[in-house]
């Protein structure tokens, strides 16, 4: 089973940037599609970005054009570059192996602790 450790979160002003990392254990990382998700206080977890093992990407409309997902299979790591951050991006960000079925990105692994992103106005 893949174990995940997210990092790179922090406090940033609106308009700023952060780059999140998700380090995964296991030799089969390169075979998994990976997703980034986020959960804000009092809200349900939502999909943010998705990357296949062939580097095809998919984004939630709310982050399209601002966030970029990438992966480095040699480092067993997936990244999320976040630019032009908005206060509504404030959430705990988590990564997970995921599948894309009929337009829905569905996580299927165990969750890590996530990394907190706070965007101030």
Image: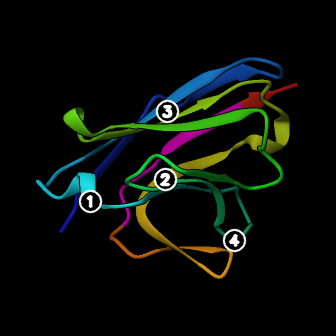
Residue 44 numbered tag: 4
Circle 3 residue: 20
Name the spot of residue 47 as percent of width and height, x first.
65, 62
The picture quadrant where one finds residue 33 is bottom left
Left or right? Give the position of 75 relative to 60: left
Lower position in the chain sequence, tag 2 or tag 4 = 4
Question: What stretch of residues is rendered in magenta?
Answer: 111-118
Circle 1 residue: 31
Identify which residue is drawn at 53% across, 50% down: 56
Name the spot of residue 48 as percent of width and height, x first.
65, 54
Local secondary structure at mark 3: strand
Q: CA distance from mark 1 to mark 4?
A: 28 Å
Please state, as top left, top right, bottom left or bottom right, where the N terminus lies in the image: bottom left
Q: CA distance from mark 2 to mark 3?
A: 10 Å
Lower position in the chain sequence, tag 4 or tag 3 = 3
Local secondary structure at mark 2: strand
Identify which residue is drawn at 37% across, 54% down: 53
Q: Residues within 10 Å of mark 1 (few under 14, many from 20)?
A: few
Lower position in the chain sequence, tag 1 or tag 4 = 1
Residue 94 numbered tag: 2
Q: Nearer the viewer, mark 4 or mark 3?
A: 3
Lower position in the chain sequence, tag 2 or tag 3 = 3
Q: Is residue 40 magenta?
A: no
Q: Are marks 4 and 3 in contact (CB under 8 Å)?
A: no
């Amino acid at each position: 089973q893949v174990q995940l450790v997210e990092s790179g979160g922090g406090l940033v002003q609106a308009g700023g940037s952060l780059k999140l990392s998700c380090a995964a254990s296991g030799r089969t990382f390169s075979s998994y599609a990976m997703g980034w998700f986020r959960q804000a206080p009092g809200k349900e977890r939502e999909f943010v970005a998705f990357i296949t093992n062939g580097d095809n990407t998919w984004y939630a409309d709310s982050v399209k054009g601002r966030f970029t997902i990438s992966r480095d299979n040699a480092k067993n790591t997936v990244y999320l570059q976040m630019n032009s951050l908005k206060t509504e991006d404030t959430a705990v960000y988590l990564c997970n192996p995921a599948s894309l079925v009929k337009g829905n990105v569905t996580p299927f692994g165990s969750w890590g602790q996530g990394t907190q992103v706070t965007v101030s106005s």
